[in-house]
Amino acid sequence: MEVGNIREMKEEFKGLEQYKVILEDWIPKDASIVIALGDTYVYYSPSTTHFHLKLSKEVHSKSTAAQVLENRHKTAILIDETIFGTAFYVIGYPIIIEHQEAALVVIFPSSYVPEKQEQYKFLTGKQDEDWVPVPIEQVSHIESLQKRTWFYAADDQYKINCTLKELQLKLPEYFLRIHRSYIINIYFIKRISKDLASNFFVELKNGSELPISQSYINDLRKFLEF
């Protein structure tokens, strides 16, 4: 069965559209829905923010869908990078299709921030042999490089023992993911431009130039209204 071919899905798994209709009352309009049956995604209703992304055909063993299928419980809001190859907030639900156990996963846009998350007021980073707490509003951007995470404030670089995936859960809303390797503080943006190949990049006030991936440009456009 070809993933994403909704007409074929409707014929073989009647009633899948009902889940989309039910969820429309409470999920963001720019959220997407996928349904997993066994080790395959059998249904995909993309939002405009995810339409350009390629859905994985197979359910990854560490995915939210796999967790739902194994435990048969609704998940908390998680970050899942197995569905599109890019990290997004998701929530999973156990459902039944044609008397078979399945998993429904709601994929939120990258601009989505979970409610009731206690936000960071500072980040503590290591510089040389010292640990330094830095107020969060002074952090210009955060980078994942060579399996390590670094954040930048003024002209200083600090190493932190968290992944971008973990940090993203508790950063203030003015921190936006622009690339699988970068999160930026929008108050440090100097300009957003295109290179000769029409790829977007952001120049920060400290002179750093960072690429903006196609996976995140729509969310950045929406948040900054450009």
Image (cartoon, rainbow, N blue to C red):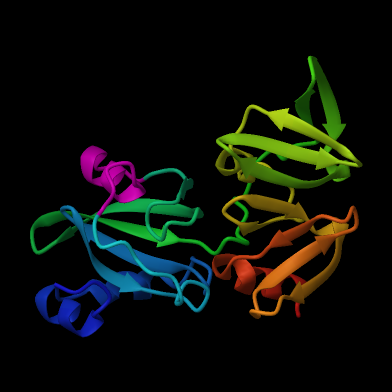
List x then y, in percent, for residue 203: 82, 63
Relative to 203, is 173 above or below?
Answer: above
The answer to whether 59 appears left or right of 195 in the picture is left
List x then y, in percent, for residue 212: 65, 65
Residue at 18% x, 53% y is: 39
List x then y, in percent, for residue 202: 76, 65
Q: Quadrant of residue 123?
A: top right
Q: Quadrant of residue 153?
A: top right
Q: Is residue 69 magenta?
A: yes
Residue furthest toward the bottom? 7
The answer to whether 17 appears left or right of 220 in the picture is left
Relative to 115, is 121 above or below?
Answer: above
Magenta residues, as a range?
A: 59-74
The answer to whether 198 appears left or right of 186 in the picture is left
Closer to the camera in the image, 138 or 191: 191
The answer to whether 35 appears left or right of 220 in the picture is left
Q: Quadrant of residue 97?
A: bottom left
Residue at 68% x, 69% y is: 220
Closer to the camera in the image, 68 or 59: 59
Quadrant (top left/top right/bottom left/bottom right) for the N terminus: bottom left
Closer to the camera in the image, 12 or 146: 146
Quadrant (top left/top right/bottom left/bottom right) for the C terminus: bottom right
Residue furthest toward the front? 196
Q: Is residue 213 magenta?
A: no
List x then y, in percent, for residue 96: 17, 58
Q: How many marks?
A: 0
